[in-house]
Amino acid sequence: MSSTRAPIKLAVLAGERSGDLLGADLIAAVKNAHGGPVELVGVGGEAMAAEGLNSLFDYQELSIIGFSAVIARLPQLIMRIRQTARAIIAAKPDALVIIDSPDFTHRVAKSVHAAMPDLPIINYVCPTVWAWKPERAGKMTAYINHVLSVFPFEAEIVARLGGPPVTYVGHRLASDAGMLAAAERQKNLRREREKTPQGERFDRPTCLVLPGSRDGELKRHLLPLGETVRELSNRCPDIRFVVPTLPRLEMAVKTAIRNWDVATEVVTGEASKWQAFSTADAAVAASGTVLLELALVGVPCISIYKIDPIAKLFTRRISTWTAALPNLIADYPVINEYFNESVRPALLARRLERLTSNSNERRDMLTAFDTVRDAMTTGEPAGKPAAKLVLHLIAEASEAPI
C-alpha cells in the first residue's frame, strides 16, 4: 500500500490484560490494512504501548472485579472515566474502539457519543448479555455502532435481544503462536498417555493450578486450592504441581503457597505459561478466559470460583446456564464447575485424580475440546477482519476512502 494514505486517529480503550492483547492485535492489523499513518489515543497496557499507544494512565487501576471492589474504588473509577472521555473528545479521533471492561469503557463511550454523535464507536468483545443483564443489548444501540464478537454464539443472541449489529471475527487465542505450539506438543503427550492401561493413573502426572489474575481472586482461591493440592498429593504422591501466574502476582502467589507443604513450582511470563500448558495432564482453574486457553491447548480441567461476598446477593440475576466458555461454545457441559460452597478440596482432588488417569471422563473432555477448537477456528487472525470493519466504519463516517 502507498504510504501517502491520509492519516487516521484511532482511540482505543482496554481495561485489563486480555483487552490489551486484543487491542494490540487490532492496532497492528489496522496499520497493515490502512497503509498510512495511524495515531493512537486511549488507555491500554504493555502490548498496546508496543504498538505506539501512550496510555492516559496505568490501566491496572481498572483491574477490579466484584461489587465490593467496584464500590470501594468508585470515586477513582468516575475520575478516570471523566479524564478519558475528555481526552478522547479533545483528540477528535476518527473512531473509538472499546474493549471489554464495560464498567469503564461503556461509560466513556456514552460520554464521548454525547459530545461526538457522528463518531463511529465499536465494541470489541461483546458484553456478556447472554449471562447477565440481557437488557444491556438493546441499550447499546444508543451509542454503539457495531460489535466485534469473539465467540460464535453471540451474534444470534444479541440480534434476538435487539442489540446493535454484531460480526464474529474470531478470538486472538485461536491463532496465537504460543497456543498453537503448546497444542501441538500436548497432542504428543496425549498420544503417550493413551498408552496407559484403561483406568490407571499416569506415571508422574503434572497438574496446573490457576487461581486467577486479580488480587481478590487470589485471596479467595489460594486457600482452598492449597487444600486441594495437599489432598491430591496424598492420593497421588508422584504428582507435580505448577502455578503459572503473572509477574506482578508472583510474590503474592509464592508467599501463599509456602503454607501448602507440597512442592509447587511457580512460573511467570507467556512463554513459561505455554510451556507449562504443553506438559500438563490436568488443571484446576479459576473461571475465566484461561478455561478457553486450556481447552484450545487440550488440557483437561475443572473450574472453580468463589464469588465476591456482595456479588452473591445478585446471583439470581445471572441468566446463563454455565460460566465456562468451552461449555457455551460446545453447547453442553464439558467442564465441571464448582462455585462458592461447592469448592470442596476433597471433591476437587478426586475429580483431578480422574483427569490424570486414562479415564472415560478425560477422553470425553478431550473429544469435546476438539469440537471447541474447530468452532473457534476462522482461518485468519481475529485482528484482520476486525481491522477491516473498523476502517469500513471510518470510511462510511467520513464518506471518503481512507
Image (tube, rainbow, N blue to C red):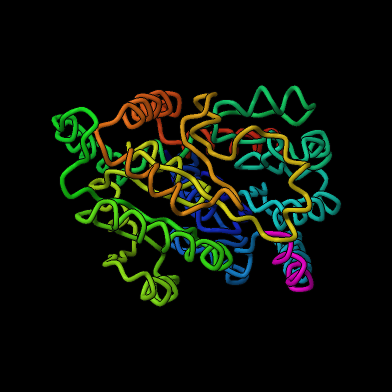
Magenta residues? Answer: 66-77
Task: Tell me: 374 left or right of 165.
Answer: left
Residue 18 in the image, given as x and y percentages of width and height: 51, 52
- Residue 214 sits inside the magenta stretch: no
Q: State the residue at coordinates (42%, 56%).
A: 210
Q: Main secondary structure of the magenta part?
A: helix
Instruction: Reply above or below: 271 against 327.
Output: below
Task: Tell me: 328 left or right of 190.
Answer: right
Q: State the residue at coordinates (15%, 45%).
A: 203
Instruction: Reply above or below: 65 against 261.
Output: above
The reply to whether residue 4 is visible in this rendering is no
Q: State the residue at coordinates (41%, 41%).
A: 173
Observer-nearest residue: 260 or 193? Answer: 260
Q: State the residue at coordinates (81%, 49%).
A: 113
The reply to whether residue 200 is visible in this rendering is yes
Residue 9 in the image, given as x and y percentages of width and height: 61, 53
- Residue 72 sits inside the magenta stretch: yes
Task: Tell me: 387 left or right of 399.
Answer: left
Residue 371 in the image, given as x and y percentages of width and height: 40, 23
